[in-house]
Amino acid sequence: MKLLSPEWTALLYLVAAVCFILALKGLSSPKHARRGNLIGATGALIAIVTVFLSIHVENFLLIIAAIAVGTAIAVPIARKVQMTQMPQLVGGFNGVGGGAAALVAVLELGQHEDIGFRIAVVFTMLIGAISFSGSAITVLKLQELMTTRPVLFPGLRWIMSLAVLASIVSGVFVVISGNWVWAVALLVLGLIVGVLLVLPVGGADVPIVISLLNAFTGIAVAASGIVLGNVLLLVAGTLVGASGTILTMAMAKAMGRGVTGILFGAFKGGSTAGSTTVSDRPVRSSTPEDVAVQLGYAQNVVIVPGYGLAVAQGQHTIAELATTLEERGVHVVFGIHPVAGRMPGHMNVLLAEANVPYESLKELDEVNSEFKSTDVVLVVGANDVVNPAAKSTPGSPIYGMPILEVGDANQIVFLKRSMRPGFAGIENELLYDPKTELLFGDAKDSLGAVLAAVKAL
């Protein structure tokens, strides 16, 4: 039984769409991000309830059971996931969204014989399948359940080309005949294309591909809105597709790479993954007490956080260290690289969790001008975003990437667990600079020892 008229349905869909737009606006600022999330969730709830009240729902109990099972799985995962695993969670969401859109398109295939309708079905199936399988590979790579390095094999480009060509042929036959066999073939080929697209990608390219696949999922959802004749799906999918595209371009710019190179460089074996060889060259080791003296008697200190800080969950300790230094009259700011961690904003969210004032976070362009007047730079768990190879070594996997110019500071202290290279897998010559010292150990433990030593000065 329909409880809502078409007019009320359209109005509520409009309200939900406005909520989605306001949510994106809120997420653009850390101060309003929480509110943005709540507005987006409210819009999703309005959309779901409107669907139930505006159409005659069959298999009501099965639908409710499916929602209950999904909720029971998603809520614990979302609550327990660490910040370091957020890209994997995003990748999982991407895949589920794309896969759902593809399955819905398959089920709708026999509903109409219109050519335009079938084209929308084919497009949704293909893009959704690519997003699903590609996202699965990115999750496996980032979770290190498979190698994070590029997976290459002879004939990859030919196999990829054949898979794409076969997908197009299958899609054409689906449009012409509406045959389920060709539809299943198209789904399988889409899954293969998704896997082959992501396998050759490694290193710091993987998060960028996640963002790209997020855009794919949005496009698939928008196409499914055409298939189902649902305007809200079309709007929501378009928003996701557009925001995912913008984010991909921003990440590519932060890495100093073109989107085209990221899309097609993998077929040539290109990636930001380098060697994992650990150097045996000597470095200057330090102690927590020595680092504390340098920090405690400095005038200007810049802290550069990275993925290692997130892994160690040392954000609260580093926030307390910054506060303690400021109480001693030291000017402290945090230098934030756009792709520090695994996704844009990763460090901002991590430090906001520890109540670090947003005004203390300085973006790359702003903080780079301050390094020449900086007494000490404390690099915590970051490597690639401060690696001078990005400027000095043509052919390096990160060559051309804008970096934090920490080498301009008077003294540099790296907090590292070991001499293993960063995510890009390349050595950092800055570690061997005469003005660089290294404090080895877990970042949280090292920061705790430095904090205690500063308090004892």
Image: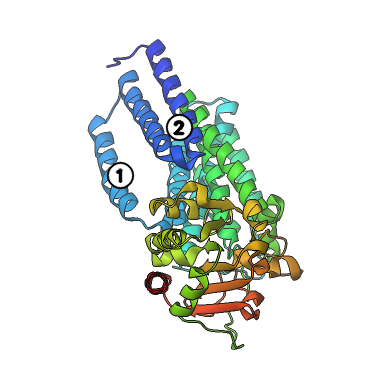
Question: What amino acid type is highlighted by mark number 1?
Answer: Gly
On residue 49, the disc is none
- In the drawing, does residue 430 fall left or right of residue 140? right
Q: Is residue 445 visible?
A: yes
The quadrant of the rendering that contains the N terminus is top left
Front residue of this view, candidates 370 and 350: 370
Residue 172 image point, x, y percent: 62, 39
Q: In which quarter of the image is residue 428?
A: bottom right
Residue 447 image point, x, y percent: 42, 70
Which residue lies under the disc numbered 1? 70
> Mark 1: which secondary structure?
helix
Question: What amino acid type is highlighted by mark number 2?
Answer: Glu
Q: Which of marks 2 and 1 is nearer the N terminus?
A: 1
Please say if 319 is above or below 295. above
Residue 129 image point, x, y percent: 51, 47
- Whole-Å distance between the Cαs marked 2 and 1? 22 Å
**What residue is at 49 percent from the left and 23 percent from the top?**
231
Residue 312 image point, x, y percent: 40, 67
Between marks 2 and 1 in the image, the one whose residue lies nearer the viewer: 1
On residue 108, the disc is 2
Please say if 106 is above or below 449. above
Front residue of this view, candidates 44 and 122: 44
Front residue of this view, candidates 25 and 320: 320
